[in-house]
Amino acid sequence: MALNNDERATGSGTGIGTTIAGISGLTARTVFGTVAAPPGHAFTLTCDGGLVGPWLGEDEEVDGPFLDAADCILLPGFIDVHIHGSGGADVMDATAESLATISSFLVRHGVTGFYATTVTASRAETLAAVANVARFCSQACSDGGIDSPVGARILGVHLEGPYISGKYPGAQNPAFVRPPSAPEFEELLDAGPVRMITLAPEEEGAGTLIEMALDANVRVVLGHTAATFDEARAAIDTGVSQATHTFNAMTGLHHRQPGTVGAVLSDDRIYAQLIADGIHVHPAAMRILGRCKGPTRAILISDAIRATGMPEGRYDMGRLPVFVQDGACRLEDGTLAGSVLTLDAALRNFMSATGWPLVQAWPTTSLSQAQAMGIDDEVGRISRGARADLTLLDTESRVVATIVGGRLAYLRDHWRLQGTTD
């Protein structure tokens, strides 16, 4: 992986210093997610202006420093469409510092882009969180020089609630669950880059909100819902295209009452989000979801909260206390409350549950998300002219390096950076 000649890498194992900027090439042997196959058995993927450039063959050398990734697997960068926080920070903190913390944490786990996810909260708190994302993204664009920190990009806001079912709140604060409000939703759309909303389609007024969302190019997601099979299918007919943390906080599958789960698993039009931590969903249920949805309709999510990457103990989510013990996050009454999962671990868990090899499972971390959000012409594939958002894995599917927009954001093994001069 070649860098500009006047740039130097700093740090090892915990990331890369902020002086790293443009990457001109990457040498490797195995790649998934490419539109055009690279030449020969070894190759160099070039980058130009933060975008993917042409392939070079094994006989063509890279001029300059490079990253030795010959024993690694190159993938499109991971995308997390459902994440509340990590590293002690939460989207609902509504601060630039918290979003920066989440962004820098995620690249260590292969994530190059994410949707900052809110929780069911007051109108003022939700507006503040959305507006903060808008300010952060604007500032990131204006400060995006070579000396700026490199982290996962915020691709938009995912509103999880507040228009959900009081019967299936999960860990959402029931004090703030409310009926769909067109004026409030319009205010949220004006406040920042809302790109998704999770709601209960059976609630009165949800139909109007779904129509508003689709008109604004916002993806509508089934979740925290008491919808019957017929109600869920009707919502899918109107344009609802995803299900949030499938199996959790929705009507379950029964052979005479298929419920929301039955509608999601049986309808090829809808993408199914999955928390693959082995706590929210049994491995056998993961395997069933994989068989029903396939790798391009299954979406791995973290649903991570601020406790992710932190010691176990007491935290909070939507003003509710959350206790993290033995890898599980629970409210005082035992209800599961998000996770401490990372997307790279989710991929390994999902492959173990389904028996799928990486060549089959990789779309669940990037391509499925990109297609579901309508951004697969920009990310989710490795193709010339697409963003150079890339993840390198070792043979155990652990993250070796993360590249965001052609910039090296994380490098586990500093020795891989070769050809530099002091």
Image (spheres, rainbow, N blue to C red):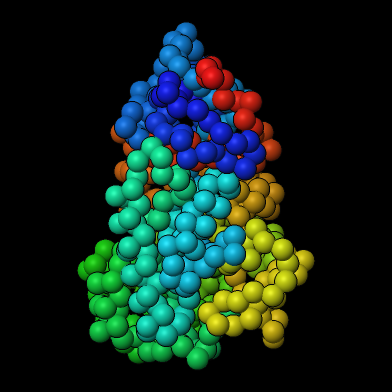
The answer to whether residue 368 is visible is no
Indicate left or right for 102 with 337 as reference: left
The residue lying toward the viewer, choosing from 62 and 206, is: 62
Query: Residue 160 at what x, y percent from top left?
Result: 45, 73
Q: Position of residue 240 (x, y in %)?
A: 36, 69
Q: Position of residue 310 (x, y in %)?
A: 67, 61
Give the residue at x 35% y 52%. Answer: 140
**183, above or below 383, in the image:** below
87 and 10: which is toward the camera: 10
The part of the image, by quadrant, that contains residue 3 is top left
Outermost residue toward the right in this view: 326
Q: Give above or below for 176 relative to 108.
A: below
Residue at the outermost front position: 422
Depicted 151 relative to depicted 219: above or below: above
- For the question of whether residue 206 can be seen, the reply is yes
Write the residue at 69% across / 86% down.
333
302 or 305: nearer the eye? 305
23 up-or-down from 171: above or below: above
Residue lying at 32% horizontally and 63% vertically, measured from the top left: 134
**In percent of the image, x 59 and y 64: which residue is there?**
88
- Quarter holding the C terminus? top right
Q: Quadrant of residue 216?
A: bottom left
Q: Residue furthest top?
A: 59
Please tell me how many numbered marks the rendered image carries.
0
Q: Is residue 396 left or right of residue 417?
A: right
Find residue 358 and report its horizontal and vertical position in percent. 60, 40
